[in-house]
Structure formats: structure tokens, C-alpha cells
Image: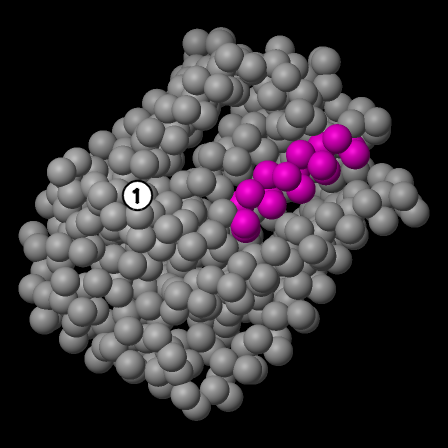
Amino acid sequence: MLEDPRAHYDKMTKTPLVRLIVSLGIPTTISMLVTNIYNMVDTYFVGTLGESPQGATSILFTLQAVIQAFAFMLGQGSGTMVSKALADQDEKEATEYVSTAFFVGVGLGLMLMVGGLLFLSPFMRLLGSTETILPYARQYGACVLVACPVTIGSFVLNNDLRYEGKAFYAMIGLVTGGVLNMFGDYLLIRVIPLGVLGAGISTAVSQFISFFILLYFTRRMAQSNIRFSAVSRRRRVYLTIARVGFPALIRQGLSSISNGLLNNLTRPYGDAAIAAMGVVNRFSAFVMCVGLGIGQGYQPVASFNYQAKEYGRVKRGLLITMGVGVVFVACLALPGFVFAEGIVYLFQKSQEVIRVGSYALRWACVGVMFLPLSVPVNMLYQSIRKPGISSLLSLLRSGLMFIPTLILTTHLWGLTGIQISQPLADILTGLVSVPFTVAFLRKTTFEH
């Protein structure tokens, strides 16, 4: 049922911060954990088919990052403005922003689907596929592209619910699809031996299921509504969504570019190396989603309270988010460091994959410990509509820090350089982000 606007205002501005951030962050974290678990389940089941099929999951990890880049831009750009509008108790404007982002996202997804399917093989090669991986990447990639319109639509709906403070319902939509995807992997790979195609079909079906669940909750629970008639005719609305969401586009877009570069630089070392780095990337994403989940729980709190001029709550919320993030990330990173060989072995029994992957995984677990220094402050500046600073911070991890580090370390140390490049970039990104945190906490006057 719909929440009273005044009750929502009081909840966002008066609820104790630890309880509010955790109540919004835990459902988001669970959603991301389940999403990453089913990604790892994909990796596990496909890994039983061999190194080349598993290499395809690394290629598709990059493709999914491309799709998510546009989805997050629209979802977080519109979500931030929805939160601002509801802080001003303007439901009409909130509806305009979310409806515009939703229908633009679905249209963009259709364009990506058609273009990707028409040029499927060149696209997979561009993302780093070898000729032995290509047949599997094509099968999986076609399924992911077919689901592209509803995938982007789901992210917009998910962010709308999150920014309205209804993270629990957003969680149900994503978790249901994720759990069904795991069963689908087992059914379509083990019981009905469709191989990589089965993993792709399972992923696509789960995206459709999540989409319809999120659409149902948005229509029933959200103060804003999804209506085609509410799609804006004002250029300012489109520019605002793009401008505010641009940091998210940078974060995810650079992730796809850097993953593609990583795959291409790893390609000379063979399918085993690509498969190993794919396993490490999946596990790193699993750990990282904890930091991201708590940070995304903070986003609606920061956006709403900043608009309501409750600046002290925004500052205290930032420190709480960083502290909670450190604890949660450490709980996953430390076991990953200690049991690196066993974790890689779960996904691929090849000794070469285990050798390459376990070394890279230990470095990755060190690197992710620095994410709570960079992720919350990045999301803060995006949520308070300071896209310039947020865009700069978004450029760091997968761009300004990672790409030069990857090229340099690969040139100096070959495969070892590839294994340590992302963790080094994570460490540097965390350290560079600290002055931006300090500057905001010391700030005494604010401009909207």
C-alpha cells in the first residue's frame, strides 16, 4: 500500500541514521549478493563444461557491464531526482522523471539488442573472446541481448523503489529472479544438457521474471507512477537524468572497457588465464557488492536529507556508511584471502586456472578492503547532485587508476602484472578519495 507523504518525510529525516541506512542498505546488499551468487553459479556450472566455455562467462561479464552502465545512468539519475521531488512533496515531478527514464531505457535496450545481435561475432571479439571461446560467447551473448530491454527497465524500477525508501520490495524483485536463475542453471545444464546456451536462457528468463515483479511493486507501492503519458516533453528533464546519472555511467562503462582490455591483454596467456581472471572478477564483484549495497542504502538518505537541509544527517550518514562497509567487506574478503585455492577450485578444477586464479584472488581481497574509502563518498556527491565531483571520483577505479596500472604492470611483469593491477588501482582509488571525504565533512555552507 502507498505510504503517506508526510510519514515518508518523517521517516527519512527523523529515523536514527544507523537504523535507516542499514534498513535500506541490507535489502540492497542482499539483492546484489544474490545477483552475484547466481553469476558465480553460472560460472560454476559452465566451468564443469571446460575452460573455453567458462572463458565465455568472462566475456559476458563485460557485456553485462555495458548494459548495466546505461541502466545505472538512467536508474540512479532518475532515482536521485525522484528522491528530491518527494522531499519537496511533488509526486507529479517524481512520476515525470521515473516514467521518462523507464521508457527511454526500454527503447535503448531494444537498440542495443538489435545492434548486438546483428554484429554478434565482432562484438564478442571486441570484448576479448578468442576463437575457441567465440562459439560459447555467441550462445550466451545472444540470450543476454534478448533480455536487454527488460534488464535496463528493471534497473530503473529497482532504483525508483530504492530512492523512495522501499528497498525491501526492490530486493524481492531481484532476489526472486536470481534464485530462479540458479535453479535454471541446474535444470538447463545438468538435467537438460543445453550447455552454455542453457546458462544464457536461464539468465534471460530470470531477467524477465524480475522485471514483472518490480513493475508490479512499483505500481502498487511507489508514490511515483510509470505512465507513458508522463514521459517528459522537456529537454531539461532528459539532460538532468543524464547529468546526475553520468557518474554511474562512468563507473559501469569504464568497468566494461577495462574488463574488455583485461581480457584482451590476458588472451596471449590462453583460455586458462582468461577463465582464472573471470573467476576472480566474479568473486571480487561478490565482495564489492557488499560495499556498494551499503553505499546504495545511503544514497536515498543523502539525497533526501540534503534537499531537506538536514546536512548534519548527511555527514554522519557518510561516516556510518564507511564504517559499516569496512566491517561487512572484511567479513568476506578475509576468508577469500585465506581459502583462495579452494574457492577457485570450486569453479574450475584445472591446475593452471587454480594457480593463476588463487594468486590474483589474494591480491583482489586486499584491494577490496579499500572500497569503503571510495564508494560512499562517490555516491554521496552523486546523491547531492554534484555530478562534476562524482564523475571525477567515478573515473578513478576502472579508469584513471586501473587502465594505466594494467598497461604498465602487464608491460613490466606480464601475467603477474595482470593479476595485481586491479587491487593496486583499488588501493590508489581509496587513498585519493580520502581528501574529498574530509573536504565534505569540514564544509559548513552548502549550495543546492
Q: Residue at x 66, y 25 (%)?
A: 126
Q: Nearer the viewer, residue 195 or 256?
A: 256
Q: Secondary structure at mark 1?
A: helix
Q: Position of residue 135 (x, y in %)?
A: 62, 11
| Above-or-below relation of 41 to 255 | above
Q: Position of residue 395 (x, y in %)?
A: 61, 56
- Measured as percent of width and height from the top left, residue 406 is found at 78, 47
Q: How is the image coloured?
A: one colour
x and y percent of residue 76 in the render? 37, 52
Quadrant holding the C terminus: bottom left
The quadrant in which residue 337 appears is bottom right
Residue drawn 32% across the image and 36% down it: 104
Magenta stretch: helix, strand or loop mostly: helix
Is there any visible trace of residue 49 in the rendered image?
no
150 to 186, vertically: above or below: below
Residue 307 visible (yes or no): yes
193 part of magenta stretch:
no
Q: Is residue 261 magenta?
A: yes
Which residue in the protein does label 1 denote?
A: 101
- Magenta-tinted stretch: 250-266
Left or right of 115? Residue 128 is right
Q: Amino acid at mark 1?
A: Ala
- Seen at 39% across and 66% down, the residue is 385
Q: Residue drawn at (27%, 35%), measured in percent from left and top?
A: 103
Farthest right residue in view: 412
* Image vertical order of residue 308 relative to residue 105, above or below: below
| Image label count | 1
Closer to the camera in the image, 206 or 160: 160
Q: Residues within 10 Å of mark 1 (few under 14, many from 20)?
A: many
